[in-house]
C-alpha cells in the first residue's frame, strides 16, 4: 500500500470547523500533526510526508492487507518517484542544493560499497534530473559521481560547479570550469 498527501504542503485555513466539515463530506480522516513553519515549504512538505507515512503504518496495523496478489501486480519501477512532487515545488537553487547533497551521498556510498544506498541515491538523482534542462549535463555528473578515485571526485566536483555557474548565468566561470573538465577528461 502507498499513500501521499495532496496538496503536499500544509495550507492555512480559516477554522478547524471548515476542515472537519470537509473531512466529513469526503469521508476522510482528519489528522492533527502539530505546528509548522509556513516560511519553510520544503520542511513542511517533509513533515506532511512523515505524518502520512506514520498514518499509513498505523492503518496497515489495524487493517492488514491479505490479498498478496495485489502487491504482486504492482509495478514499482513504473510508478512515479516518491520525491517527484517535492522536486517539482523546489526552486532551482533548492534543487541544486539537493543535487549537491545527493552527489555527496552517492560519492560516499561508492567509496564504502553500500550497494543499496548507491541504487537509491542514483534513482533520486535521476528523478531530480528531470527538473533540469539537458544543458546542466546531469547525466555526465552522475557518470563521474559513480566512479571511484580522486580524479573522478575532482571531475564530479567540477560538474557540480558547472551546474551552479550555469544557474547563476556566470558564463566566464562556466567556461573556465568546462575547460578544466575537458583537460581532465580529454574531451
Image (spheres, rainbow, N blue to C red):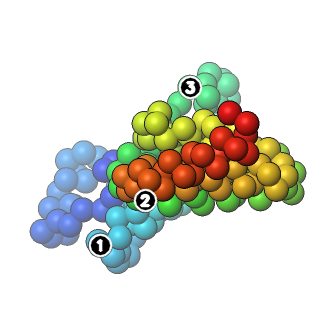
Residue 154 position by quadrant? bottom right
User: Could you tell me how far apart the alpha carbons at marks 1 and 2 are, in whole angstroms?
Assistant: 14 Å
- Tag 3–tag 1 contact (CB < 8 Å): no
**Residue holding disc 2:** 94
The first of marks 3 and 2 along the sequence is 3
**What x and y, as percent, mark residue 100?**
58, 58
Tags 1 and 2 touching, CB below 8 Å: no
Residue 60 is labelled as none
Q: Height in image: 47 above or below 4? A: below
* Residue denoted by label 3: 78
* Helix, strand or loop under label 2: helix
- In the rendered image, the vertical position of residue 136 relative to residue 95, given as above or below: above
Viewer-side label of 3, 1: 1
On the image, the x and y values in percent for residue 58 come to: 55, 57
Tag 2: Cα neighbours inside 10 Å, few (<14), some, or many (≥20)?
Answer: few
| 104 relative to 138 in the view: left or right | right
* Residue shown at 40% from the left, 55% from the top: 170
Q: Is residue 75 above or below residue 85?
A: above
Q: Which residue is mark 1?
A: 39
| Residue 1 appears in the picture as rendered | no
Q: Nearer the viewer, residue 78 or 40?
A: 40
Give the quadrant of residue 101: bottom right
Mark 3 or 2: in front is 2
Question: Which residue sits at x=29%, y=47%?
Answer: 27
Residue 132 visible at all: yes
Measuring 43% from the left and 41% from the top, which residue is drawn there? 131
How many numbered discs sit on the rendered protein?
3
Amino acid at each position: 500500500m502507498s499513500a501521499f498527501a495532496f496538496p503536499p504542503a500544509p495550507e492555512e485555513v480559516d477554522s478547524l470547523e471548515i476542515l472537519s466539515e470537509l473531512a466529513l463530506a469526503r469521508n476522510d480522516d482528519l489528522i492533527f500533526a502539530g505546528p509548522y513553519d509556513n516560511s519553510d515549504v520544503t520542511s513542511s512538505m517533509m513533515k506532511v510526508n512523515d505524518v502520512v507515512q506514520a498514518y499509513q503504518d498505523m492503518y496497515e496495523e489495524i487493517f492488514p492487507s491479505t490479498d498478496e496478489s495485489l502487491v504482486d501486480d504492482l509495478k514499482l519501477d513504473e510508478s512515479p518517484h516518491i520525491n517527484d512532487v517535492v522536486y517539482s515545488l523546489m526552486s532551482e537553487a533548492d534543487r541544486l542544493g539537493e543535487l549537491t547533497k545527493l552527489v555527496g551521498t552517492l560519492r560516499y556510498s561508492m567509496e564504502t560499497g553500500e550497494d543499496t544506498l548507491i541504487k537509491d541515491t542514483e534513482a533520486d538523482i535521476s528523478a531530480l534530473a528531470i527538473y533540469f534542462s539537458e544543458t546542466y549535463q546531469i547525466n555526465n555528473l552522475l557518470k563521474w559521481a559513480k566512479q571511484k578515485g580522486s580524479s573522478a571526485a575532482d571531475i564530479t566536483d567540477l560538474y557540480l560547479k558547472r551546474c551552479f555557474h550555469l544557474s547563476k548565468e556566470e558564463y566566464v566561470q562556466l567556461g573556465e570550469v568546462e575547460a578544466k573538465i575537458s583537460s581532465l577528461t580529454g574531451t
